[in-house]
Amino acid sequence: MVYVKGPGLYSDIGKKARGEDYQGDRKFTLSTLTSNGVAITSSGIQKGDLFLADISTILRNKNITTDVKVDTSSNVFTTITVDEPAPRVKAIFSFVAPDQKSGKVELQYLHEYAGISTSLGFTAKPTVNFSGVAGNHQATVGTDISFDTATGNFTKLNAGISLIATDLIASLMVNDKGQSVTASYFHMVSQLTNTTVGAEFTHGFSSNENTLTFGAHHMMDLTTGVKARVNNYGMASALLQHEWRPKALVTISGEVDTRAIEKSAKMGLAVAIRP
């Protein structure tokens, strides 16, 4: 698919400030690439006494990518992505066997000043989802709506706006049919060391609860980075991520409740090896 520099999709609003990679479990991922271009990925994760594993195969043929994943519960997840069946359009077909009601088709359209995504379930009375954003490299506004044709009700009604500058992104989102509002801020402090800070504030009108989270990221050198975050409930998380060779990452993370320091901290380990 030809890359279009534009506002992206609705899911991109506030994404920078949320952060990723925090892992409270033990996870291992190994990817290999065969001579004919088939990518095979095996992963396992231990959650307490429960061990979950899956294996996925990705096959690319021209503009069609087929991703098939099988997990330990004998579920088969299939995703077929077609790049540019029409200009600037991506089509995604997905379903889970043996769940006959899981089938879904999604169409994405990326324009220089707009991004649209719509999906429809393969059922007699499906749930229809539509999200769209409009804007440029300085400002984006959008909405995310889901409608259940079986009940005739809107199951999701969200809206958001994002303001973008050279080194910062500020976003405001109204979620849960107006029952909650989230404001986020992301700032690039130094491009040389990839040092960033971010904050996210969420207020629930029905519960009258507030959640405020601060986070930061810093690259100690070219292969080692650290992240940390803490919220107003005293939950603090940190991680150390090291690339010991190209595309081979080990991540050590931990989480502690600072208001109940006597409790055991949660520790996580993730190892990912890619070709």
Image (tube, rainbow, N blue to C red):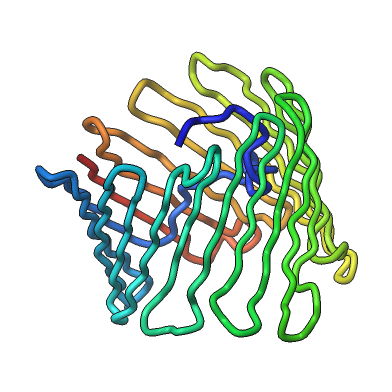
Residue 116 in the image: state x and y as whole percent: 67, 47
Residue 148, image quadrant = bottom right
Which quadrant of the view contains residue 168? Answer: top right
On screen, 235 above or below 125?
Answer: above
Q: Residue at x 78, y 52 (%)?
A: 143
Question: Which x, y percent locates residue 156?
Answer: 75, 67
Q: Is residue 71 left or right of residue 143?
A: left
Residue 114: x %, y % from top left: 70, 37
Q: Does 50 sit left or right of 122 as displayed?
A: left
Q: Nearer the viewer, residue 238 or 44?
A: 44
Query: Where the N terminus falls, by quadrant?
Result: top left
137 or 251: nearer the viewer: 137
| Residue 190 locus on image (x, y percent) | 57, 17
Horizontally, residue 3 falls left or right of residue 14, namely left
- 68 or 15: which is nearer to us? 68
Looking at the picture, does residue 204 appear above or below residue 198?
below
Q: Is residue 18 above or below residue 51?
A: above
Residue extending farthest front: 86
Q: Residue at x 20, y 40 (%)?
A: 275
